[in-house]
Amino acid sequence: MYKLRLVSTDEEIIQFERLRTEVFSKGRKTINTLYESPFADAIKDGDMLAFLCMEEKRPIGGMLIRQQGKDIKLSRIFVQKEKQGQGAGSFMLKYLDDHKNFFEDYYATDIYGIITEPLNTSVDYYFNKGYDYSGYQMYKQYKKSNK
């Protein structure tokens, strides 16, 4: 069972960045301070929201999002190699879909969709999750409500 934890403290930012660099740089770099994190200032200032994906109180992945116009931009999504293919990535994407109201309240605006820039190897994954491909981005628009 997965849970998401919003990153809010300096220690959580470092934990998030360690996990992100472990996945993306194959463990060649270790983050020890906030100064080594390219996203620390944006996370601390609230310009970007970082979430840790937890499995039994252990972080196994995460996602980094920000507002882009009237949309949410999924800037990074990652899962530890040994945990890939077990539903953690799908869980995080579903969280974005299911918590549209949270993001609208946080950004104080209507949110129309989700944008992501997938790696070439993950385009099919996003297609299967309902995203449309346009240029270098995948886009998923929220269904219009009948108000």
Image: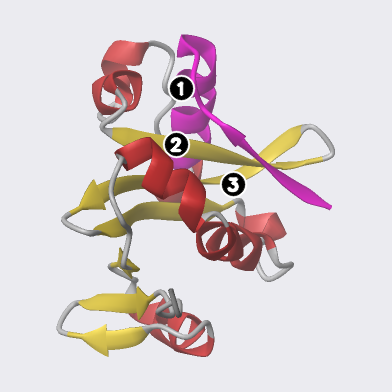
Q: Distance between the residues labelled 2 and 3?
A: 11 Å
Q: Residue 61 carries which label?
A: 3
Give the x, y percent position of residue 13. 46, 22
Please give the residue where the numbered disc 2 appears in the rendered image.
50
Tags 3 and 1 touching, CB below 8 Å = no
Q: Which residue is drawn at 44% across and 88% down?
A: 127
Q: Which residue is drawn at 47% across and 20% down?
A: 14
In the rendered structure, the answer to whether residue 56 lies left or right of residue 78 reads right
Tags 2 and 3 touching, CB below 8 Å = no
Question: Is 146 or 138 nearer to us in this picture?
Answer: 146
Tags 2 and 1 touching, CB below 8 Å = yes
In the rendered structure, the answer to whether residue 71 lies left or right of residue 89 reads left
Give the x, y percent position of residue 137. 23, 75
Q: Quadrant of the C terminus?
A: bottom left
Give the residue furthest to the front: 147
**Amino acid type shown at disc 3:** Gly
Q: How crowded is mark 1: few (under 14 residues within 10 Å), some or many (20 or more)?
A: many
